[in-house]
């Protein structure tokens, strides 16, 4: 598909990463997986995803640190970021929004169908 949307999935929990990847592939998206924030930064130099699905608690560079770096680098900050995290405190959610997240999903309450629906909405904008 020529207009296939690319999602960068930054998730270190392999089970969840594979589950999300399968679901989004089924919806016709191209998924690029990064296992930590450092790998995500490297990938972002080569690919221009349409959306970033980002965990916060990651090895090497945390999701919040990655968002900060993206904010500081105008060449890669254009992709909307949707956070999927176990950090569900109001302060964490606010910090995510301040750093530019367009959506924030808490893993414990995560409905994959809802996430897919929201991602499609964000990509239509």
Image (cartoon, grey):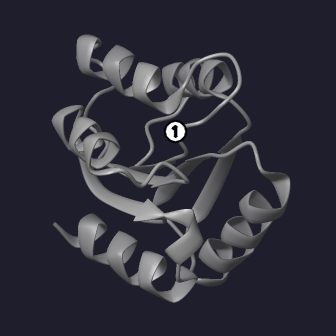
Residue at image position (45%, 23%) is: 66
In this rendered view, identify the residue nearer to me: 103 or 51.
Answer: 103
Q: Which residue is mark 1?
A: 56
Question: Looking at the image, which residue is at 59% across and 28% down?
Answer: 40
Residue 18 drawn at (x, y percent) = 79, 64
Q: Quadrant of the N terminus?
A: bottom right
**At x 27% / y 41%, what residue is drawn?**
91
* 123 displayed left or right of 34: left
Q: Is residue 35 above or below residue 88?
A: above
x%, y% of residue 49? 45, 44
Q: Position of residue 10 (x, y in %)?
A: 61, 42
State the image quarter where residue 39 is shown.
top right
Q: Residue furthest right?
A: 15
Q: How many marks do you count on the picture?
A: 1
The C terminus lies in which quarter of the figure?
bottom left
Q: Residue at x 38, y 83 (%)?
A: 117
Q: Position of residue 20 (x, y in %)?
A: 67, 69
Q: Is residue 43 above or below residue 23?
A: above
């Amino acid at each position: 598909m020529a207009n296939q949307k690319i999602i960068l999935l930054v998730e270190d929990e392999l089970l969840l990463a594979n589950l999300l990847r399968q679901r989004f592939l089924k919806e016709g998206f191209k998924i690029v997986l990064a296992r930590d924030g450092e790998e995500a930064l490297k990938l972002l130099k080569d690919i221009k995803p349409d959306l970033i699905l980002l965990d916060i608690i990651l090895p090497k560079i945390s999701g919040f640190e990655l968002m900060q770096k993206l904010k500081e680098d105008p060449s890669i900050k254009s992709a909307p970021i949707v956070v999927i995290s176990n950090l569900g405190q109001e302060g964490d959610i606010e910090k995510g929004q301040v750093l530019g997240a367009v959506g924030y999903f808490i893993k414990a309450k995560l409905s994959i169908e809802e996430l897919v629906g929201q991602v499609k909405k964000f990509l239509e904008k």
